[in-house]
Image (cartoon, grey):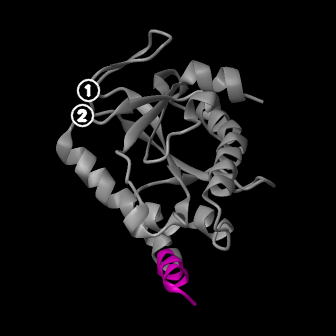
């Protein structure tokens, strides 16, 4: 077993603990198709953001925070060395999983308060085609914190050597509730 294999095994062992402490919810418990997201409600704490449809996200607005189930994702791509294949695979998994997020939002008891969904990622190419808008993280401390948390995932997912990697800045991905339901409600 190589370093990545060991790292993934350790990560799989620790993931249930992470899941417990972050109050995440699985969206695919009773589904045939696995969902790549785990979610939870959050109150937005960043600067005010205005989306293309005029929706403004302000401090303390309720959003559904989406988390990629990274260890599951990395396991599905463990033997693949083509970064383009990985990007396309991730895009398809996200596209297939967003209807589960739409269903979660629609059925949530706080539906009327939820303004949209939010995620933080280093990989934002193609996200506009999925309906997301991107925003930079202005707080240097928070950006550094998120970068340090996402960097190991980035290293484990890349097939290139660490010397040739340019690490992108983490960004917010945001989609309004209306956009989510319009695109992905089944």
Secondary element at image label 1: loop
Image point (65%, 62%), residue name: 82
Q: Point out which mark residue 47 bears.
A: 1
Residue 37, compared with residue 12, is above or below; it is above
For this orientation, the residue located farthest to the right is: 32
For this orientation, the residue located farthest to the top is: 54
Number of marks in the rendered image: 2
Lower position in the chain sequence, tag 2 or tag 1: 1
Q: Quadrant of the C terminus?
A: top right
Q: Position of residue 35 (x, y in %)?
A: 67, 52
Image point (48%, 70%), residue name: 15
Image point (36%, 26%), residue name: 61
Image point (26%, 26%), residue name: 47
Asked if the stretch drawn in magenta spans residue 111, the answer is no
Q: Position of residue 80 (x, y in %)?
A: 67, 68
**In front: 165, or 144?**
165
**In front: 47, or 164?**
164
57 left or right of 85?
Answer: left
Q: Point out which mark residue 59 bears.
A: none
182 left or right of 12?
Answer: right
Q: Which residue is mark 2?
A: 138
Q: Quadrant of the N terminus?
A: bottom right
How far apart are the alpha carbons under marks 2 and 1? Answer: 8 Å
Label 2 crowding class (10 Å Cα cut-off): few <14, some 14-19, many 20+? Answer: few
Magenta part of the chain: 1-11
Q: Position of residue 142 (x, y in %)?
A: 24, 46
Q: Are marks 2 and 1 in contact (CB under 8 Å)?
A: yes
55 left or right of 97?
Answer: left
Q: Position of residue 24 (x, y in %)?
A: 49, 54
Q: Main secondary structure of the magenta part?
A: helix
């Amino acid at each position: 077993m190589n370093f990545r294999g060991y790292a993934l095994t350790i990560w799989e062992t620790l993931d249930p603990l992470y899941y417990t402490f972050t109050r995440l919810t699985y969206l695919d418990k009773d589904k045939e198709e696995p969902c790549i997201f785990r979610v939870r409600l959050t109150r937005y704490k960043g600067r005010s953001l205005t989306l293309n449809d005029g929706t403004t996200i302000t401090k303390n607005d309720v959003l559904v925070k989406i988390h990629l189930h990274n260890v599951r994702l990395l396991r599905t791509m463990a033997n693949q060395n083509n970064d383009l294949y990985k990007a396309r695979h991730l895009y398809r998994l996200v596209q297939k999983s967003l209807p589960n997020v739409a269903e979660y939002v629609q059925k949530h008891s706080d539906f009327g308060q939820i303004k949209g969904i939010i995620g933080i990622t280093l990989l934002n190419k193609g996200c506009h085609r999925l309906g997301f808008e991107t925003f930079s993280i202005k707080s240097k401390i928070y950006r550094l914190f998120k970068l340090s948390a996402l960097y190991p995932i980035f290293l484990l997912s890349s097939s290139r050597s660490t010397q040739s990697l340019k690490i992108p800045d983490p960004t917010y991905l945001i989609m309004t509730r209306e956009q989510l339901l319009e695109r992905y409600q089944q």
